Amino acid sequence: MFRPSAIRRLAATAWRAAEGVAQWESAHAHGIEISKAQRIAERGFIDGRRLSEETGCEVLGKSEFQNPGGSVKDRAALYVVEAAERSGKLRPGGTVIEGTAGNTGIGLAHVCRSKGYNLVIYMPNTQSQGKIDLLRLLGAEVYPVPAVPFENPENYNHQAKRHAERTENAVWTDQFDNTANRQAHIETTGPEIWAQTGGKLDAFTCATGTGGTLAGVTSVLHSYITSGGQLKERTGSSITEGIGQGRITDNLKPDIEMVDGALHIADEKTIEMVYRCLDEEGLYLGASSCLNVVAAKEVAEKLGKGHTVVTVLCDGAYRYADRLFSRKWLQEKRLLDAIPERLQKYVVL
Ligand code: PMP
C-alpha cells in the first residue's frame, strides 16, 4: 500500500520548483498568508554549508513527510487499523478511536476514509491549531483535552479508551502499547532503509513518541534514541511536537536494550537546524525531523569521516509554520537568538 519514501542525501539538494508550489499551496490551505508563505518557500534554495560535506559522512534522511498523510505516522495508522480488522474488533461501519498528538490522527483519518470507518480523536490541547483543523477537514470528530500526564485518568489516551468502551463496534487503536505500530516499521521502514542504502550504513538516529519508529527500525539497524528540550532544562518541556515519552511503551520494550546510545538535543540546536535545512537543503521540515538531523550530525561527527548515518524526516513544517517561523513565538520560547544572523531572514511571520 505504501510506496517507499525517498531517502535523501542531506547535501546540496537541488531545489525543485514543484516542491515550492506544494509548500505554497499547503501553506494557503492552512490559512497562512500567501505572500509570507511564498517568501519562506522562495528562499529555500540559498546556498549554505551542507551537512554531509560538513561531517565528511553521508548524512541521509528518510523522507517520511512525503507519505500520503504527510508524516511517518501513516505507517502505524495503517497497521493498527488492519490489526483491529484481523482481530475482529473492528467491523464494517465501525469507529476507530485514538489518542494522538496529531500526526497519527491524520494518518488514521486517511485510512478510515478509504476503508469507511468513523474516527474519533482525543488530543492534548497544547497542539497546533493547524493539526486540529486538518483532522476535522478529513472527517474526524476531535476532542482537544487538557494536557495532563499519563498517570492522570483524564489523560487523552485514557479518555480515548473509555470512549471506545462505551461505543458499539468501536476500537481504541492504542498506538502507544499496540505493537502493530512497531510492526509497521519492522516490515516497512527498516527494510526500506536497508534496501535504499544497500545495507551500507553505520547508524540511525530517531526521537520517540510511541517509540514505534525507533523500535521497529532498531530491530533491523543500530540506533540512537534522541530527546529534546531547552539547553538549561534537560527534563521537562520541549518545542518539539509529537515526541517525548515518560515511560517505556510496549512498542519500545522488546528493543530498548538494543539501542546503542541516547542523545539529548537542545531546542536551540533543533530550531537552528529547522532554519538550516530550509536554507541549505530546500527542505521545509518539522522540529522532530530537525532534532533527528542534529542527532545524525552529532553521531556522524562521533563516528568520524566516511560513515553513513540515517535519520527520519518525520514530517514537514506546514503544520507548525505559525510557530516555527513566528518572531513572537520564538521570542516567547527564548529561541530567537539561537537562529544565526544569516538565517534570521526566514523569521517572516
Ligand atoms: N515526530 C512527529 C512529528 C510525530 O508526530 C511523532 C509521533 N507522534 C514522532 C516524531 C514519533 O514517532 P513514534 O511515535 O514512532 O515514536
Image (cartoon, rainbow, N blue to C red):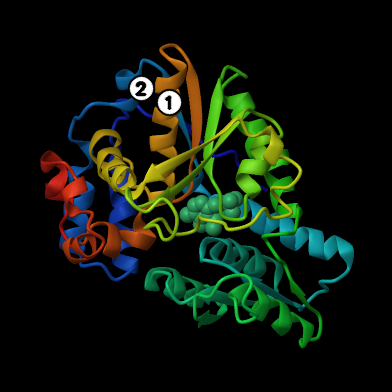
In the picture of the structure, the residue carrying the numbered disc 1 is: 59
Please name whichever residue, 328 or 138, is drawn nearer the observer in this view of the structure.
328
Residue 262 as seen in the image, left or right of residue 179: left
Q: Looking at the picture, does residue 70 appear above or below residue 332?
A: above
Please name whichever residue, 8 or 234, is drawn nearer the observer in this view of the structure.
234
**Rendering coords of residue 334 (x, y %):** 22, 58
**Rendering coords of residue 4 (x, y %):** 59, 38
SS assignment at label 2: helix
Q: Identify the residue at image location x=23%, y=42%.
A: 44
Q: Amino acid at mark 1?
A: Val
Residue 266 as seen in the image, left or right of residue 154: left
Name the image quarter holding residue 250: bottom right
**Rendering coords of residue 61 (x, y %):** 46, 34
- Please report contact status of discs 2 and 1: CB closer than 8 Å, yes or no: yes
Q: Identify the residue at image location x=41%, y=61%.
A: 237
Query: In which quadrant is the C terminus drawn?
Result: bottom left
Q: Which labelled disc corresponds to residue 52?
A: 2
Q: Amino acid at mark 2?
A: Ser
